[in-house]
Image (cartoon, grey):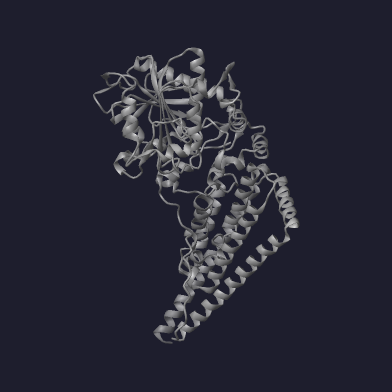
Amino acid sequence: MTTTDKSIEASSAEQIDQLKENLVRVEHLSKRLIEVLAQKKGHNPGLDAPNQELFARAASSYWAAMAQNPTRLLEQQVQYWGKSVQNFAEAQQAMAQTLAAAQNEEGETTERPAVNDRRFANPMWETNPYFRFLRDQYLTNAEAIRTAVDEVEDLDRVDRQRLGYFADQIINMMAPTNFLATNPDALEKALETDGQSLIDGLENLVADLEANDGELIVRLADENAFEIGHNIATTPGEVVYRNRMMELIQYHPTTETVHETPIVLFPPWINKFYILDLKEKNSLIKWITDQGYSLFVVSWINPNSDYADVGMEDYVEEGFLKAIEVAKEISGTKQVNAVGYCIAGTTLSLTLSLLKQRGDKSVKSATFFTALTDFSDQGDFTPFLQNDFVDAIEAEIGEDGIMPHYIMARTFSFLRANDLVYGPAIRSYMMGETPPAFDLLYWNGDGANLPGKMAVQYLRGLCQDNKFVTDGFELFGHTLHVRDVDVPLMAITCETDHIAAWKQCYRGVQQMGSRSKSFVVSQSGHIAGIVNPVSRNKYGHYVNADLSLDADDWMEGAEFTEGSWWPRWEAWLKKRSGKQVPARVPGAHKSYPVLEQAPGNYVRAKARG
């Protein structure tokens, strides 16, 4: 036996041993997979798809239209058939070219327009006839489905939008990249690793299921890479007040003097507050303190079933009003400047209406980050804010009285399904990759439950019935209305925000009663447009003082400024923040001693039902 033969034999033996080891691991993982799926609680099926009446109405309308105009159906079918045959012919031509190249013969090449889709970046989607045909036929099918949806008549605006959304979900789900046998990246990785990538992927899948009680929530970031308070949410501060709803953090001053009027910042309670304090270089919290302000930030509780009966009124009374009261007492002032982000901005508006009706002038100015108050156009959330889905949410809340965090997380994710669902799932489960150590994605996965009562109040009273700008929203025996918001205000919105579209935010601000209103549209989306540090000089912003215009005209006449909106806001805020006073140190007030170092205890609680 030659040395080469011995080497081949040894290599084969090693591969067999590796195969046996992998088979044992697959068996073990399969058992874990079965166990976790057997323990899955399940959820209301109404959360997965719209009422079937929508599809029935769409189908009926489609076929009725085609019966009246059968040539249109025939035309669509002929176009579809023709494109399908063309895809097959081009695949055959590609095969011939490949064979010709292998035989050192010259093959004719056909110029084709590039496919501008990141899912099909692998060169094999173009060079390999099999994958090329799969891609082209998938894109043809997608176009045919979208055309059919566009042809449906006799549906109102909401149903048309819902039909289009769910059709797109089906299209995205059926992409060839989502299946191992038709994903060249995953197949290449499996060959390169002797199947180890598939084992690792199964490990990741089982781990994600186990971490979420059988619900499949794709992990977006390496959770082991971050520790709250250690390498994320590290700006120095102290918890100086705590109740069942929130911890109030007072941040350490970084200047010898500060503006007299403190800032109280209310983040959303759907996620954790540290989106504004990810790391030093992009922390809005640190930047505010560096500009010479006393800053208080609310860290909300992550509720469990004990909070089933907590409503919007509890967030207002034990959160907003209490935080404002404590900040005033610690600072020795009669007023604060308040900031509300997303749903907390909506609730800040409710609070301001309540204070107005009570004759309470505790808030000197208000700043709204991507905050909706007028829900007459529900934007991308329209598919989820109809009765069938909200009914399913109420049923899911059930006896526990808690809206599980994954419902909101899944809703937000499927608005950008390829980026936040299928892409991460492919990398994790098919290619066996460890999720990236990305702080923003870590935060995105650190969700919170919602009290059932509060969720229904918000979905029914504000989102569906739009009471805050119509008949008024009932709370504390008051009828709250957007026109009561009359303090000086600045609203920061984001150009590509798919959660709180800037035009919808603009419409609400127009209806507020303040005589001093500033409106800003930052480039980028719901997070990056707000977490937009000055040092990066990445995203600019638009301003226009004329808020009497409709949204399109406002943007057409807006002035664009390079760089972050933060300095513009600070210049506006400075005029409303009073004289300079000695910097306030957390814990110095005898009635509010230090309870714990920032970021506190509430922020560390993981979402569980």
Vertical order, 415 against 369 (above or below)? below
Determine the residue located farthest toward the top in the rendered image.
Answer: 359
Residue 182 sits in quarter:
bottom right
The answer to whether residue 45 is above or below residue 308 is below
Query: How many tags in the picture?
Result: 0
Residue 13 versus residue 54: which sits nearer the camera?
54
Instruction: Tell me if 330 is positioned left or right of 503 in this view.
Output: left
Residue 408 position within the rendered picture, expressed as x and y whole percent measured from the top left: 56, 40
Image-based side of 320 in relation to 169, left or right: left
Relative to 157, residue 188 above or below: below
Q: Quadrant of the image for the C terminus? A: top right
Residue 429: percent from left, percent from top: 52, 57
Residue 42 seen from this side: no
Q: Position of residue 252 (x, y in %)?
A: 31, 27
Quadrant placement of the N terminus: bottom left
Instruction: Check the image and name the residue furthest to the left.
Output: 256
Q: Residue at x 68, y 39 (%)?
A: 388
Residue shown at the point (51%, 15%) measured from the top left: 357
